[in-house]
Image (cartoon, helix red, strand yellow):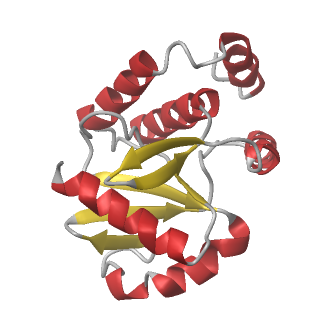
Amino acid sequence: MTMMKKAIAHFAKILQKHHFDFVVLNNLYGAQKSSLMDVYVIRKDREAAKMVLVEWKSKDNDNAYLIRDTIFVLHDHTATFNSKDKQTYWDDMIDDYWDELLDHVVIDNVSVPMLPPTLQAIAMFADVFHHYKNNTLTSGMVEDWKGYMKLKESEIVRMELRSKLERLNML
């Protein structure tokens, strides 16, 4: 098991110990190509999670935490969109799905939550697009997204994917 996987499991244990609702927004299947882990902590738990994580806080970013040589970045949204309408649609949808069955990856005997496959695919694509627009895209981000799409192809609901991407003007 890689050091990054151990760090992810450790991070998840910290949040789970305090009963915080969260999801990891990266591809956790296979080897990670990116050295950053993007995490969304649900709004009601976010400030409390930051207090718990304060000892690992990065000096460079108020929302970044260095745990076992892996940087975890807490985000205010599971995906960022360029209009208030799209952002509200997405955030409300995530809140509605929150109590649904999330996807989970077991790492070092720790169940790490992720969005359901269709929403995870959209969130990862939106992240790739966001980094592309800001000239911060790395090949690792693209490879993680491609790997996730290939692995979860049979679990991604194509009609739902298409309708959500159309609603977000991403098609």
Whether 100 is drawn above or below 59: the answer is above
Identify the residue at horizontal 44%, vertical 43% (top origin): 105
Give x and y (percent) for residue 6. Answer: 25, 58
Whether 171 is drawn above or below 102: the answer is above
Give x and y (percent) for residue 124. Answer: 49, 35
Q: Is residue 31 visible?
A: yes
Residue 105 falls left or right of residue 123 = left
The residue closer to the viewer here, 23 or 76, is: 23
Whether 132 is drawn above or below 96: the answer is above
The residue closer to the viewer here, 47 or 11, is: 11
Q: On the rendered image, what quadrant is the C terminus found in? A: top right
The residue closer to the viewer here, 137 or 49, is: 49
Residue 46 falls left or right of residue 39 = right
Give x and y (percent) for residue 98. Answer: 74, 49
Q: Residue furthest front?
A: 109
Whether 26 is drawn above or below 57: the answer is above
Identify the residue at horizontal 33%, vertical 44% (top origin): 136
Identify the residue at horizontal 49%, vertical 46% (top origin): 25
Quarter of the image where one finds residue 48: bottom right
Identify the residue at horizontal 24%, vertical 37% (top origin): 31
Give x and y (percent) for residue 16. Answer: 53, 69
Q: How many marks?
A: 0
Q: Is residue 63 visible?
A: no
The residue closer to the viewer here, 55 or 77, is: 55
Quarter of the image where one finds residue 134: top left
